[in-house]
Image (tube, rainbow, N blue to C red):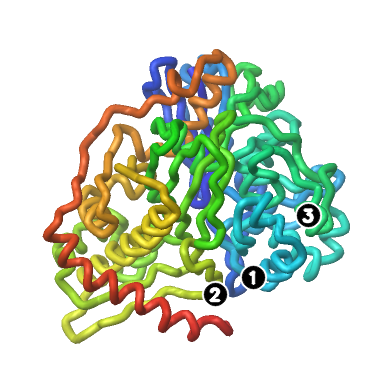
Amino acid sequence: MFLGIDIGTSGVKAVVLDTHGAVVGQGVAALTVQRPHPLWSEQDPEDWWKATSAAVLAIDPSVRRAVRGIGLAGQMHGATLLGADDKPLRPAILWNDGRSFAECAALEEATGDFRTVGGNIVMPGFTAPKLEWVRRHEPEIFAQVATVLLPKDYVRLRMTGEKASDMSDSAGTLWLDVAGRRWSETLLAACGLTEAQMPRLVEGTDVAGTLRADIAEAWGIPQVPVAGGAGDNAGGAAGVGVVTDGKALLSLGTSGVIFVANDKFRPNPARAVHAFCHCLPDMWHQMSVHLSAASCIDWVARLTGASGAAELFQRAEAAGAANGPEIFLPYLSGERTPHNDAQVRGAFFGLDNDTDANRLAQAVLEGVAFALADGLDVLREAGTEVAELAVIGGGARSRYWGETLAAAMDVPLVYLQGGEVGPALGAARLAQLAVDGGTPAEVCVAPPVSHRITPNAELTARLAPKKAAFRAAYARISPLTASN
């Protein structure tokens, strides 16, 4: 059996698979995000460790004793700064933190290699500008930085004592030579860093350490190998078989991501498309990334007094798709693809005397769908063909939302059994590859199809005017938030 651990933003999920790929154990533990100032988003690394232990210990002891390998996946880009004693110097700055927009401009001006070698526009979400912000605003902290780790790799350090990171997660730092799959001295130097402050690089299918004896005893797991693992999106892709050129998925987690596997490095920074290494050797991927997706569902549920996402979906269905004038811009934490705008914020438009909680709920579902459609269109503009999208993440539970998504993006959606497990599933499969060998095609197979949603042409036509109004609304609201 193989254990996959996903260190997410809202919680840690642990999943155990048997050698046939069936889920035989699960555990979860919640996390919270601290926002002490506008644009800031932080977490205490100690909370990741506590939640990881809690999620693992929630699995039946007999299942834990049978684990033969562990894989890690996690939220990308988080700047975890360690001192010489390997303890965090400050709270980790997360992927959806927008404070470093000024530092992004400075780094872009310093060297064009971020776009060519790193393959991406410098955006506040990435790790590099976060370190540049710390260098400028917290120089006493920056001077003490001995190691920079990503969230899952901090958990690996606690588990194994090893400082290592896989290619897919490391590409999201903007310090990686993505085509060459190695650290770039030029990109590190632009942030006042050296390779000595970086973890060693491994492929996601490599063994990157062994579970420490004391952790093994505490968790009731043998001292098993720990695989390199993956950034959350690449891990999700490995979990649902998106491991060959052209295969694609839609992840509906806190953020929303369209992920396309590539057999070559294909950057397109001009339109804010991400181009990273895959978690598998000799594979890369493109992504359109939207900072708010299912998080918008949770937000409007709280706003309108719904008990949770399930009630929110019921309210939206009662309103009906494309039946009201309300338009929602889902930029609660800014946006990446295609706008690269950390300062823009969400908004409702078109409210009238008949607007109620049900119609607000529907507007939020549509707004997220329109944002994802923007991202898919950018991928298509770059010549990427997407025949269908496998759907993963917590948002995959709603078939009703899926109908709106399919119509807005005009692409078939494929829902897979267990798809809501997400990156933890892929992490467990990477552990299997590290321990037992084999090929990704043999191990990282798509789970059975639960159902498919084909775009409804009539709904697509009814949504088209609202999608056009949605796109026009961004241009109007962006100047209002640019100085905030």
In the picture, the quarter occupied by the C terminus is: bottom right
Mark closer to the observer (2, 3): 2
Numbered tag placed on residue 101 in the rendering? 1
Mark closer to the observer (1, 3): 1
Residue drawn where x is 73% and y is 65% of the image: 107
As helix, strand or loop, the secondary structure at mark 2 comes to loop
Residue drawn where x is 69% and y is 45% of the image: 176
Residue 35 vertical position relative to residue 249 in the rendered view, above or below:
below
As helix, strand or loop, the secondary structure at mark 1 comes to helix
Residue drawn where x is 64% and y is 56% of the image: 115
Numbered tag placed on residue 49 in the rendering? none
121 with respect to 200 (left or right): left
Query: Which amino acid does the dot numbered 3 rest on?
Result: Leu
- Place of residue 402 in the rendered image (x, y in percent of width and height, measured from the top left): 25, 51
Tally of numbered tags: 3
Residue 247: quarter of image: top left
- Place of residue 10 in the rendered image (x, y in percent of width and height, measured from the top left): 49, 51
Are the residues tagged 1 and 2 within 8 Å (C-beta)? yes
Numbered tag placed on residue 89 in the rendering? 3
Q: Residues within 10 Å of mark 2 (few under 14, many from 20)?
A: many
Residue 44 vertical position relative to residue 421 in the rendered view, above or below:
below
Sequence-first disc among 1 and 2: 1
Are the residues tagged 1 and 3 within 8 Å (C-beta)? no
- Place of residue 321 in the rendered image (x, y in percent of width and height, measured from the top left): 17, 64
Query: Which amino acid does the dot numbered 2 rest on?
Result: Gln
